[in-house]
Amino acid sequence: MSPPDEDRPKASGHTPDPEGGVDHAVGGWTSHGAGPPDDELPGRARRPADDGWDHAEAITTTPWDTPPTHLQETMDQDVVLDCGWGQLVFGQTFADQRTMASVLRQEVHGRRDICLYLRDPHVFVARHPHEFFIDPSYTYRLRFTPTDAEPPVAPGVVVRPIQGTDDAEAMDRIYVRCGMVPAPPDVLWRNHAETDHVLYLVAVRADTGEILGTVTGIDHERLFHDPERGSSLWCLAVDPDCSVPGVGRTLVGALAQVFRERGRSYMDLSVVHDNDAAIALYEKLGFARVPVYGVKRKNAINEPLFTSLPTETIEDLNPYARIIADEAIRRGIRVEVLDAEAGELRLTHGGRTVVTREALSEYTTAVAMSRCDDKRLTRRIVAEAGITVPQGRLATFDDDDAAFLEEVGDAVVKPVRGEQGLGITVGISGPDELARACARAREHCPDVLIEERAPGDDLRLVVIDGEVVAAAVRRPAEVVGTGEATIRDLMEAQSRRRQAATGGESSIPIDDVTIATIEEAGHGLDDVLAEGVRLRVRRTANLHTGGTIHDVTAEVHPDLRTVATTAARAIDIPVTGIDLLVPDVRAPEYVFIEANERPGLANHEPQPTAAAFVDFLFPGNRGLPRVWTPEGATDH
């Protein structure tokens, strides 16, 4: 199930993509102690061995005026689980609506409570129409039977419970990358280690130990002696940069297997009503709709769920503009959406008004923009400031181009003007290939730049107001074989996951460059890639063409930070993304590649880039400090 809505790119909450992130991190603890072992619980309503719990009285469909007898005899009363993001109120444990309403009224500012499984939710809301509303989500249930098949397992992936606060910190990083609210790692670990009703599982790459995704389960029987012997799934989250297919399905299956082995009757989850991709996955896995509903309190964050929205709101923004809008709203800055498709906003606080287009503001001059737009001009300006640039020349489309290639041995061809990696070809070593690359680049700009290809990783450093606030290594798109799917199918699945995680901003194009890259590795688009085999399908690490990004802010060498701030000063631009090629982010060696006047701040979460950007726009309205740790933002 998805936790309640928070200040994040999709205020409606729930699963944005079955293989991507689910909304908010569940943390915290419950005042109800862990129950005794399952076989020692007194008064347990046992299910028949042959056909499940259906013959028992159904708590969630019993009217308030005739509470089931087993509710009174065996189940804990008025159960509230503090989940970090807010309280999870189990409505079936309340015998009095007035008590439940009183609990929900205690919602703390900045937290979002939810009540599930309440009987007669329409009556409850009708009695409190100005305070509460029915959450517009579907509840799906996976019923367990003795003949259930083994759950699917993604290639090269192992699922295990978390083992300490280091795992909890890795979970937090995934939550933040998925636009979810993190919880203190010690709280996550305490939930897991000191109770037997909350379970955190992580999916881990068997070869590297990297945590790729996580899921949370709540055991209803252990939490409050549930006579229906139920359980629920929360916080399914897969790293948006994960290239292994099927991690989300693997986590769902692993959690279901745990609850099945514990003798639970079913596992529930909740999904927003219009999330067709997630619904299709859950139905494929055997989940079926059940008439179970949730209630939330009416507040500003939940407002889109219970009111009609204007034509364009922050809900329509892409992640790169939305992260700025969310940060501004959090600080009390007025946000007007001028053009949702373009990401254009008007921010107002006091007597100050600033117009932005994602991370580009009116404080970036037209001169600075033109310097970034023209890669040839950028090279000259930063070189004059003492920054190392690769050998390069403007293409003349004659034998001199081939002579330059012979001199450098390996080259990159790019249009002088352009963005999002369009028209760029990397790894050119022959004259025929050079001619084709120049022609491809010329389709996007009449002027073409040929540069010596430098070895190393693609490092992006985000500079805001003269300070490096984030650093990340970008890697080209790759897929991982399953032994069954073709390379084309793997790329399409990876593209769907990347599109869901980036609001449609990132996908792997199936074009001449992709096909050539695959063929160079000895494969074709319709080949079946062996299980566990990793195949790089693009040469460039641009995020718009499916590249992935990996935070290295805490590791980057001080000299590289200096290069980035020096380049920003030379261009005279207040907010920029400086791209370098580096053999090692912890070493000073580098080659300058280019500068971007509109860096995607959302790509660098959990680093508080949006906070730094709003600090720059509104110096008198300081927000979060600029250094992020897994425990949260801290001062320098």
Image (tube, rainbow, N blue to C red):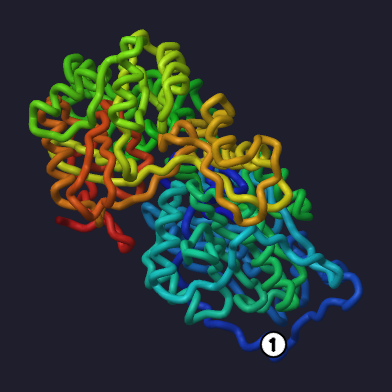
User: Is residue 126 visible in the rendered structure shown here?
Assistant: no
Which percent across, then down, holds residue 183? 40, 62
Quadrant of residue 331 in the image?
top left
* Residue at the (25%, 56%) spot, across then down: 555
| Circle count | 1
x, y (%) of residue 522?
60, 41
Tag 1's secondary structure?
loop
* Disc 1 residue type (three-letter): Leu
User: For mark 1, what is the residue?
Assistant: 41
Q: Is residue 452 left or right of residue 204?
A: left
Q: Quadrant of residue 57?
A: bottom right
Q: Quadrant of residue 7?
A: top left
The one nearer the camera, 370 or 61, is 370
Q: Is residue 352 left or right of residue 436?
A: left
What residue lies at 27% left-to-right and 55% top-to-bottom?
Answer: 628
Q: Of 414 and 321, which appears nearest the observer?
A: 414
The N terminus: image quadrant: bottom right
